[in-house]
Amino acid sequence: MCQLWFNAKPFNLFTDGVFRCFHCHYMGSGFSYRVNAFWCFCLRCAVVSHSFTYQADEPHFLFFDHKYEMKCNSCEYVMSTFKYRCKDCTFALDSRCVMFRRIAWHKSDQHTLTLAYQDLDDYPLRRNCDICEEERDPQKWFYHCETCDNAMHIECVFGKYPFINAGSKYAYKGHPHSLTFVKKIYYYTECVRCREPCEDLALECIEQGCKYIVIYR
């Protein structure tokens, strides 16, 4: 049992199970700090400091704040709860966006991707995401390949569930056998429930001979 700096409640360390982090709101699996099913925190949020220097287009000294309403510089979402804001200006990041890595990778591009803080390209047709092909908001941060000049939504690079580990077990009442999380990369099996391809995270039966697989939503 331990105490985290942002909450006075005593927390227990869990080593398995699927949970939603109360701080960054990502679904995760494996290690977490919990009081109950509602008060769960992933290790990333548990170990981050209450203040630190964040390097964006310029350095900002951020500190944890939950009082004032501010807009996140990354996703444009107006925050009234957990966030990190600069002590010298209006720069602020919510507890999810502050975790974005400066360097990332995706199977659609053979090069490293760099976190970009603004889109200076005025040509509308170049504002589409090179993964999903949907339009990007030029005010929001994105990942960019300098070699290929590819630009991608942050959510498309990481996927919907980046912190649920493939191979984690999951108890599902709708199937008699044990299920495990899988991420299909190239061969997308058809979901037995909706008949759509399992393009991201899915639950697959580990029982030999059983071909049960469903998209995790």
Image (cartoon, rainbow, N blue to C red):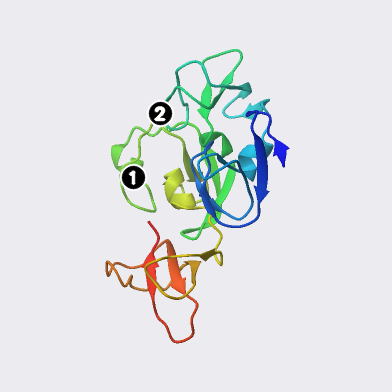
Q: Nearer the viewer, residue 83 or 18?
A: 18
Rendered image quadrant of residue 36: top right
Which residue position is annotated with label 2?
A: 77
Instruction: Mark 2: give few (<14), some (14-19) or many (20+) Cα within 10 Å.
Output: few
Compared with 63, 13 (above or below) is: below
Query: Which label belongs to residue 206?
Result: none
Which residue position is annotated with label 1?
A: 128
Residue 62 visible in the snapshot: yes
**Percent of width and height locating residue 104:** 56, 49
Quadrant where the C terminus lies? bottom left
Q: Residue furthest left?
A: 194
**Percent of width and height locating residue 208:** 49, 85
Q: Nearer the viewer, residue 26 or 32?
A: 32
Disc 2/disc 1 C-alpha distance (Å): 21 Å
In the structure shown, which secondary structural element does the residue marked by tag 2 occupy? loop
Residue drawn at x 47%, y 31% is 74
Q: Residue furthest right?
A: 2
Q: Nearer the viewer, residue 205 or 155?
A: 205
Disc 1 residue type?
A: Asn
Compared with 77, 136 (above or below) is: below
Residue drawn at x 54%, y 36% is 23
Residue drawn at x 53%, y 21% is 66
Left or right, residue 40 beside residue 197:
right
